[in-house]
Each structure stands twice: as structure tokens, then as C-alpha cells.
Amino acid sequence: MDTYDPQAIETKWQRVWEDARAFYVDNPPPGASPNGEYYMLEMLPYPSGHLHMGHVLNYTLGDVVTHFQRRNGLRVLRPMGYDSFGLPAENAAIKEGGHPREIVESNIANIERQMRRLGWAIDWDRVIAAHDPAFYRWTQWLFLRFLEQGLAYRKEAPVNWCPNDQTVLANEQVVDGKCERCGAVVEARKMEQWFFRITAYADALLDDHDLIDWPERTKTIQRNWIGRSEGAELLFRIDELDVDVPVFTTRPDTVFGATFFALAPEHPLVDTMVERSPNGDQIREYVRTSMAKRVEERATDEKSGVFTGFFATNPATDARIPVWVADYVLMEYGTGALMAVPGQDERDGAFAERFELPVTQVIDEEQGVLVDSAQFSGMPVDEGRPAIVEWLGDRGRGRPAVSFRLRDWGFSRQRYWGCPIPVVYCGECGIVPVPDDELPVILPEVEDYRPKGKPPLASNEEWLRVPCPRCGAEGTREAETMDTFVDSAWYFLRYCDPENDQEPFARRLADFWAPIDQYIGGIDHATGHLMYSRFFVKVMNELELVGFREPFQRLFHQGWVRQGGTKMSKSRGNVTAPDELAEMYGADAVRLYILFAGPADQDMDWTEEGVEGIARFLRRLWRIVHEAAAGDVAAADGASLVRKAHETIAKVGDDIGRRFVFNTPIAAVMELINELGRDPSAPGARFAAETAVSLIQPYAPHVAEELWEALGHSRLWEEPWPVADESHLRRETFELVIQVNGRVRDRVEASADESEDALVARAKASERVQAQLDGKEIRQAIVVPGKLVNLVV
RNA sequence: GCCGAAGUGGCGGAAUUGGUAGACGCGCUGGACUCAAAAUCCAGUGGGGCGAAAGUCCCGUGUGGGUUCGAUUCCCACCUUCGGCACCA
């Protein structure tokens, strides 16, 4: 027996698998229908310099599932790609020189080397990268389909503006209201932006949660993010302007208490009021100052506002109530106007107090009934709500309505390193899509991709100026690029057909492999990537590009790997290089350790203490399996080791397959090895050794393969997953726990076929029980068959 | 403020449907091997009381209550930590 040399073993088997194309899967011929396929996917990495332990956890989890499902007879598609557009590479290029492309491509090469070093079972024929024109051509193609459907559009909207860097910042670049890079305070600025109409799918995104097997907390986060509120839209008339102004409210039952009316500073009516009101200057000044405020300031500052001089008619009371402009009213939510009920709403109350406006109580909180509400007084709140809406509806003043918190997805970026948006602006025709056959619009070289107040592409005049595809007049290309979340909203379908140069993917191949059977990634993407991908698939489904409505059937979130209390991520430098760890202990040890450290869905603090214990386990496994392999191949039915092996098979299969937990199977195999180690030549030793090696293979595939050969077999990666034999699990005797009043007092060996009465008799006969009973009367005896007897005295 | 998750030895954690709390590992202690060390192997290891010992009793899963023959597990209240949302009408 040689000593365990992980480096040599791992190099050897990685070559064998690659030569055998062990983990590559071919696409089916036309006409084939799905038959036992499994699509396993982890969120694709951003190609920063190197992998960190968080990646190792993510991809090792996926790897265990991949091996497990493969050996359970499924054809597993498990591809890999790179989210290679985006700000970090661009910022690195600005800081360190070089081109973002060179940076990500060298990073990709390094990451792929690290991934191969860890021995992950990946189909390397299907690699994609967001910045590859062969990929982003189809990102552009999909954008054009959304544009045709009216699902991509431009509108003016507030963005984060850094006055120092002269650029728009993505939300994730704003930290505590300041620019991540230069520290300048970020301003809100109104700019025209591209949006995807995700709000049109708000109800579908909520309803289709029923179709998918996701963690409840993730669905909850998405539900809160979508923020569906049921209520009513009520009309308040402003006679002087001859307009009906709609408001949204979730509390139509409080309408009798609406004593003033408030408009957002951005509300379109405000302009008219400025013109017609005697204190127009005051209103204009108020609007100007509140628009200059950051959203945060508007939320935290004391309530402010200005009276417009106009009055609105409360549709319930017919009272004329004053109309104010107040910046606690948000244009983005509801209708940008609200009926203020200071008696019931805390914010309206604070405003009324500040400006000495009348307050009316219309709900008796203790009784839960309406008061001072005309014919509705005395009615319970729940009944009053629909009754008032119906009554106002009859008078043409209201109707039931639903409002959402969800906003459309602003996806344009005034930055260089992203997918170009394939449209041309023409003075005659407006926004004109680039024809499909002219795609891709290649991201051109620019002299300087630092942000300078306009998109870097706008300074490449030669590229920018093109004839309008429709009328031929001189036009200009869109110089903004797409948010990288657009790339990742559909990448998982490209893996199904990565070489296709006629379409993003053939529908038959997407429908063959997808939806993804198991997706694994961080919960931090709950409201971003996971929402956008669902939206994209719903649209693609309506366009008949795919036959399904949800991209990710099952979802699992791995926990954060922290180091010294902060989370490891691409933007922080606190990383332990996994390949260095693999050089020290071997990839198998690294893989085992990251999964043994705790439950995979819980956050963990990274520490290298304990990795020695795993290395020790692997050396023990190596020695004990070799010792067992040298022993006789003896028939061993009924041997304790054989039963232990079958118990371990049952435990590991149930843990990985049903419970989706990954730390306890390792402990179970350790237990088996501990028992085997006590006597490696005992009856059943050989079977126990084979079982341990087979069960540990998804975690530590290299050493498992080597030991499988030592046991006289080959190609463990193709070996069917072991099945526990029920007959070996049955026990003839068991340890009967005897309790008195719920406290364990004795344990005795009992036979599995004893009657309940016999077990109770055994319990009563126990000396220790006798000592406890001390002559007391037994009132009740509870028997749990196969486990315990509880005597109640 | 609202919504959600979690709290178990010195440490990471286990206990799957209400049924033996602390599996497995780290660390630590003692021993074997060794000139010595490392590595390896063996034994012990929640806290406390009584006992020379074998043992035996009590306490113990964030805190306080409750349901139950029996609660880490279920219910109520509270504390702490973490995450999401937050002037959303």
C-alpha cells in the first residue's frame, strides 16, 4: 500500500475523466423526447481574479448533486459560464490599465484552471461568456423581441448621479448614499432610461410561485418586493381646474376622515397649479427644493409641504378640503396623489399637526367599527371597506383597485463594458431597431472608457453615426449598454444549444433540458436575477420560444462563507485561495471540508481549523480500505458491519436525495469507517469498505476512484448508486429505553417481536426502575414499539 | 416600524413525524510508539453532587410561562443576532 498522495491521484483521475468525456452530455437527435434528464445548475460566476471559498461551496454542492443524480441513472446536464460584462472589470481596467476584455479573459482562464483543479464534473463543451459576441448577439435579439412587444421602452426616470465621476451609478455602486469609488454624495437626477415592463407580469410572478419548489423565505422576499396591495381608486374633484384626481388607498373605509389632499411634487397637475395659483412662486420653490433632495432625505426629514390655494371635494362628505403639495407623497406609487386621513394614518397625522389641519376620527379602534361616517357608522371595518367602495362606485366616484410596489426594470447603463443596445435614433423615424440580420452590434473599441458624463460609446463618432435602417437618413446608435442582469436573465437556456448561430437556442433543446431541475445560488439574488429570469421566461413563453413558464423548478440557497465577520465577495479582498488549499490538502479534502463545516444553507465563518481533521479522515479511509481490501472475500450475511453499511446507504441516500443536506452524510460515512477500522478483517469488512468508498464518491471523487480500483473494480463514476437492502436493516433485538415519568432510568436488550405487555413487564422488572418506583402505583404505561416504555406513577 | 430566519458543550455542529440531547469532527487531557518531535494508534471529555471504585442522583438546548405520559421539536410572551422591506397611502 502506497501512502495517500492526493496530488498524484487527483491529476491522474482528472485526466481519465476528461479522456473518457465522463461528464459531457450530447444533445438528443431531433424527435427524441425527454427520458430521465436532469438539469443541474449553479449561478454563473463573475470572473473576478480568482475563486473564493463561497464559490467552492456553491459548485461543490452542485457537484455532489450531479454525481448523485448521474449514478441514480439520470442524464445530467451541468454546464458552466461567465457573467463577464459589468462594472468591476471596467473599474479594474480604469484603475490598473488594460482593456476590460483582456482582464476578464485572463480571469476566466485562471478560474477555469481552479475549477479543473477542484475536479468538478462540468461539461466544458458548453461554456459561454456574456461578453462573447456569439452570446450577446442573442441578448440583443431578445431585446428586440421585447421592444416589438412594447415590453422594452424609454422613459424619463430618476437615477443615481455621481457629480465627481460625472456618471450614472448602478444601485450597487451607491453605498450609504455615496459613490463607492470616490465617496462623493450621490444625487438624484432625472434622465431618459430604458426600461423593461416587468410590472405587466406582477400578478403572474406572484401566482406562479405555486408552480415552483422554492424556499418559502425566497418567495416571501419576492412577494414583499412585488408588494401587491388591494384597495380602491377614488376620485376627488378639483372644481377650479375642472379635473377629477384619482387616488389609490388601501383604506377606503376611512374616506370620511379625509380632511386634506396631497400631491407629489412631480405630479403633472402641479405645473398647472403653479401657473394659476396666487402663491405659484412658493409652490415652484418648494417643488425645486424637494426634487433636489435625495430619496433618503425625503424619507427622514420632517414633513414638509405647501398649500396650493386649491380645494378638492371629498367624494364621501362633499366637503371641500385643501390641496397641498408634499414630498412625502411619492409619484412612483399609486397615482402620485393621496387622500390624507390624519385621524387614522400616522404620516398624515404628523403632517396635519405640523400645518394645523383638521383631524377627524372615523374608526373606533377598540370596537373595530366606523364612526362619524354617515350611514356607515357602526359598521365593522371589514364590512365598511367594500360597502363604501360600492357606494362610491354607484356615484361614479370609485372602484376597487390593486397597486404594486414593483417598478419597471431600468436596464440602461451609461458605461462601456456591457451589451450594446441595438437601436438607432433617427430624426425622422425615432427609435429604430437594428434589423436582426445586422446583429450583433459589436461593442467597439473606444479611446477612453472612463465615464465623462456621457456614455463612453458616445465619443466613438465613427461607430455612432449610421444611416437609419428604416429611411436611410443619418442616425445615431444607442450609446448606452445593458445591465448585466439582462445577460443572466436568459443565459441558462443558451447552455442547451450553445453553438446555435441561427437563433438563441432551438426550442426543442430548451424544452428538452429545461426548466432547470435544481438551481443553486445566493439568496441575495432573490429580488434581482431570480425575478428577472422568471420575467424573461414568462415573456419567452408567450413568444413561444419556450414551452414552460418558470426557469428554476427547485431552488436552493447556499449560505454565505464569511471570514472575520464580513462576507466574501468579489468586491472585498478577504479571500482564501481554494487552489492553494488544494495544493496543501488535496481537492478532495477541500471539497469535503467545505460541506462538512455545517449545513450548506447556513452562513459560516471560514476557518482552516478542522481541515486537518478531514485530511486525517482521508488518510484513515485510505489505510482502512486498503486493509479491508487485503482481507478475504467472505460471505457475511448478518454481520454487524454489513448492517451498518446498509444503514449508511439508507442514511446518505435519504440525506442527499430527499432532505438535501450534505454535512450529515459525511458524518455517516465516518461512522462506518470508524466501525470498520476497529477490525478491518471482520466479516463484511470488504462490503463495508466498498460501501464507504461508493458513498463518499460525490464528495471526494478522486480518492474514491483510486480506492475503488484497489478494491478490484473500475469506473466508479458510472457505478449505480447503492440501494439499501431492507432485509439487512431489520434488527432482531433493540435497546429498550425504560422511562419513569419521562426520565430515562434503564436500558435493556429486547427482542423485536415482543408484545407490548412483555415490554412493560420487562420495564417493571428492572431493578433501577424498582428503586425509582419505591412502592408507588403505576398509573399508566406508554409503549413506543421498537423504542421505549414510559411508566407513569 | 413591518415581514422572515436563527439561538444546543470550549468550538463547528447532530437529533428527519413530539420519544434515549450532544452523532460526526475540531480542540483539550491521559496513555502507547519514539532518543526526541511530528505523524499514527488507544482511552477520556456538557455542568454539578455523593462515592475509594463500580456506580448513582440532580441540573442542562436564549429567558419566562403553557400543552403533553414525554418538548431542542408544538403554543404564548419576551430577549439577542442576522436578513429583507421601509413616508408604499
Image: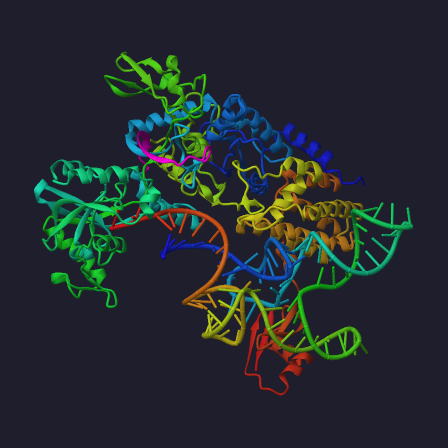
Quadrant, the C terminus of chain A: bottom right
Residue lying at the far bottom of the rendered structure: A775
Q: Residue at x 46, y 30 (%)?
A: A87
Q: Position of residue A634 (x, y in %)?
A: 77, 51
Indicate whether A54 appears above or below B7. above
The spot of residue A475 in percent (x, y) is 30, 15
Q: Is residue A546 above or below residue A776?
A: above
Q: Residue at x 19, y 55 (%)?
A: A356
- Residue visible at 22% across and 38% down? A285
Q: Is residue A785 visible?
A: yes
Quarter residue A720 falls in:
top right
- Residue A408's place in the image compared with A356, above or below, is above
Q: In the visual, does B45 lie left or right of A227?
A: right
> What is the count of numbered marks?
0
Q: Is residue A182 magenta?
A: yes
Is residue A266 among what the camera can see? Answer: no
Give how far across and how far down residue A308 sits, in percent: 15, 43
Classify the position of the N terminus of chain A by image quarter.
top right
Residue A660 horizontal/vertical position (percent): 54, 49
Magenta span: A180-198
Question: How is the structure coloured here?
Answer: rainbow
Q: Is residue B10 left or right of residue A317?
A: right
Most foreground residue, B36 or A359: A359
Asked whether, in this view, residue A267 is left or right of residue A602, the answer is left
Q: Residue at x 64, y 86 (%)?
A: A774
Q: Nearer the viewer, residue A626 or A151?
A: A151
User: Does the stretch in magenta take in A160?
Assistant: no
